Amino acid sequence: MILAAGKGTRLRPLTDHTPKPLIPVAGVPMLERVARRLIAAGADRLVVNVSHLGEQIEAFLRERDGFGVEWHVSPEPGEPLETGGALVLGEPLFRHDAPFFLHNADILTDLPLGEMYAAHQQAGALATLAVMERPTQRHLLFDERGLLGRTDSAKGLDIRVRDAVGGVSKLAFGGVHVISPRIFGLLTERGAFSILDPYLRLAEAGETIRPFRVDAFHWIDIGRPEQLAAAHEKVAQLAD
């Protein structure tokens, strides 16, 4: 599932008439970059949630024939439902027979998706999250057992749902998940909500949410003009 319902307000005026997932980086729309990487990692069905200018995204997918795989859009009525709400709304479009990727459409990265998927399957976790050390006001906390809390210095949050086992790593989330389909039977939240809320609730109940470190790989969130410019520059460097 590619999360493509955001309004992209920080990129205005670029996103006034173009949805953020269709903003190009070095001539290629971000949605296409993400989709092709997921397909190269083994995905054979795409579910794309849409809201702001969603008809453009659906037309783009139809024009590209889903990049050669089965595809569906999950329209969100009204305001975007955030990560968790988008997943609940899109559940009928999933097959429920294998772990799946959940990937933000505005993340330019070369992290090894295939290795991440394999690590998730080997661990038998409920979810595996791409994480790294980088400057941010928001962090996830992991110990030897997996996710145990999160912090947000801007909001004064420091949440820990259980006692730590061994050392604690304070890591930034990279917007890419691999998730077991059994999560659908565990999501009691409804409406618009962050997937981090059930992750922490379920971690407290004994479920395992594992980190997958991607510090050694490129990662850029194109959500701001300066980050979009950095993404153009990084792709140009890699092409040289």
Image (cartoon, helix red, strand yellow):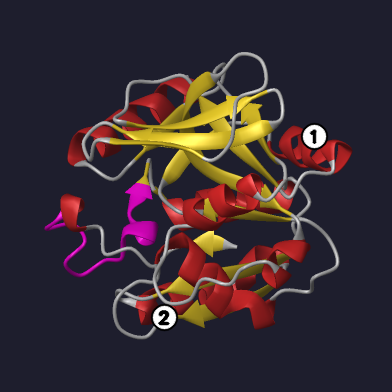
Which range is magenta? 12-24
Mark 1: few/some/many CA within 10 Å (<14, 14-19, 20+): some
Give how far across and how far down residue 137 sits, in percent.
Answer: 29, 30
Along the line of sight, the residue nearer the viewer: 8 or 16: 8
Label 2, secondary structure: give it. loop
Give how far across and how far down residue 169 sits, in percent.
Answer: 54, 19
Along the line of sight, the residue nearer the viewer: 154 or 129: 154
Q: Is residue 153 left or right of residue 197?
A: left
Along the line of sight, the residue nearer the viewer: 65 or 182: 182
Which residue appears at 40% of the width and 49% of the height?
106
Q: Is residue 21 magenta?
A: yes
Q: Are marks 1 and 2 in contact (CB under 8 Å)?
A: no
Give how far across and how far down residue 100 sits, in percent.
Answer: 72, 57
Q: Which residue is mark 2?
A: 76
Q: Is residue 46 left or right of residue 176?
A: right
Mark 2: few/some/many CA within 10 Å (<14, 14-19, 20+): some
Residue 174 in sight: yes
Q: Quadrant of residue 66?
A: bottom right
Give how far across and how far down residue 5 sits, in percent.
Answer: 38, 68
Q: Is residue 2 left or right of residue 178?
A: left
Amino acid type of the residue that numbered disc 1 sits on in the rendered structure: Ala
Q: Which residue is mark 1?
A: 119
Tell me the quadrant of the picture where the N terminus can be found.
bottom right
